[in-house]
Amino acid sequence: MNEKFRSRIITSGDVSPDKKESIRRRHTDGPMYFESLDPSIAEAVDAHGLEILPEEIALIRFAEDVTNEAMRKAGVKPFEIPLNHYHVLPAEVYEKHFSGNATTYRYKWSESIFMNADSVNRKVLFGSITLHELMHVKSHRTLHVIATDTGLEINHRRDGVSVISNKAEEGEFFRGLHEAIVATQEKISFPDMLSIPEMKDDKNFWESSEAATYRQEMSEYTGVPADDFLWVQPVGDTGIEWRQFSYHHHREVLKFICEKIQETYSEYADWVGVYEEFRNAHFNGDLLKIARLVEDRFGKGSFRILGEMTNDDESAIQCLEKMKVLSGINVR
């Protein structure tokens, strides 16, 4: 199979083939270095950036391996983000620069990942968040290059399966599905992440009866399914620290759709096989196959309903109800 590049370039106006090729290379042959960090952020990294520890480097390597293998399966040329593009900042410094993003921030043009130290203070959290962000960073992109009187303007029109309208009032479609694909991989890869040598102690605890008891108790207390906890651990004499895999409701939508499609198509051994078709689209940008799978199973117009799901929890809950109705399930 010939490898595809993860980005597609569309143009408006007088954009020469050489210039288009130059832009393509800068967006597909590896991380985008062409625009430097905001000076204040670069200064904060120099002054306050925390050391990436050896076990964290191992978790970065794990996340790189997972995402690169997924890219290969999607027929896309893989690449790695340099270690110096990962930054952990003290909470007070992080919050000063990225106040609207509680745990992590991806700097679009330089493909750098910034993490709030308080949010990645356990290896399991660092590893899971790193994989989540790399799924975003390495996703398909469609770039719209517009020739203007002052030069070339570059706009994103696709991000993974997300479709970004050139009309601001129309916003973005398939954003909820995009997050569901990313978060599902985060959960699927969790057992393998625990199995790397640097996670031995975490794995031993997670597989213990003590941890199972904590998960069950917290499930009864919070309503979160016991198998949806990323981490549960006692803190002090009476406290419990816990973390859930991200985008629970969106993952429910995607898993339900995959299960129903798998029931229809015998070529898929389980729902994960169908999920991989969605993941392929996330990396290679080909929406046609997953659109056909969804509409063949749920009917005409169902893929548009999926596209209207935002990254809001309530939107995902409503989308699941609609898809259940389309599948013949009475939700009342």
Image (cartoon, rainbow, N blue to C red):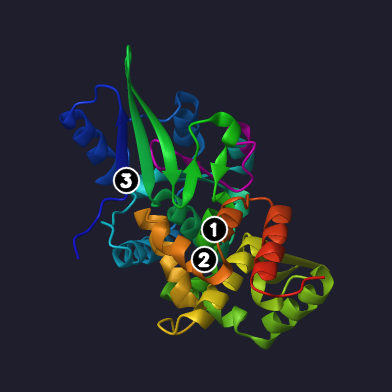
Q: Write down the residue under mark 2.
A: 294
Residue 289 visible in the picture: yes
Q: Is residue 245 left or right of residue 241?
A: left
Q: Residue at x 36, y 33 (%)?
A: 144
Q: Is residue 138 above or below residue 185?
A: above
For marks 1 and 2, the one nearer the N-term is 2
Tell me: 151 left or right of 166: left
Horizontal side, residue 49 vs residue 78: left or right: right
Q: Choose between 26 and 33: the one closer to the eye.
A: 26
The stretch in magenta equals 95-112
Residue type pointed to by label 2? Val
Residue that numbered label 3 is attached to: 7
> Residue 87: within the magenta?
no
Q: Earlier in the sequence, mark 1 or mark 3?
A: 3
Q: Residue at x 26, y 51 (%)?
A: 5
How far apart, in angstroms, are the residues tagged by discs 1 and 2? 6 Å
**In which quarter of the view is residue 10 placed?**
top left
Query: Mark 1 highlights which residue?
Result: 303
Q: Which residue of the protein is positioned furthest toward the left in this rendering?
A: 18
**Which dot, 1 or 3, sits closer to the camera?**
1
Give the structural element (helix, strand or loop) at label 2.
helix
Residue 170, compared with residue 74, is above or below; it is above
Residue nearest the observer in this picture, 216 or 75: 75
Camera-near label (2 vs 3) is 2
Name the spot of residue 132 as percent of width and height, x first: 50, 57
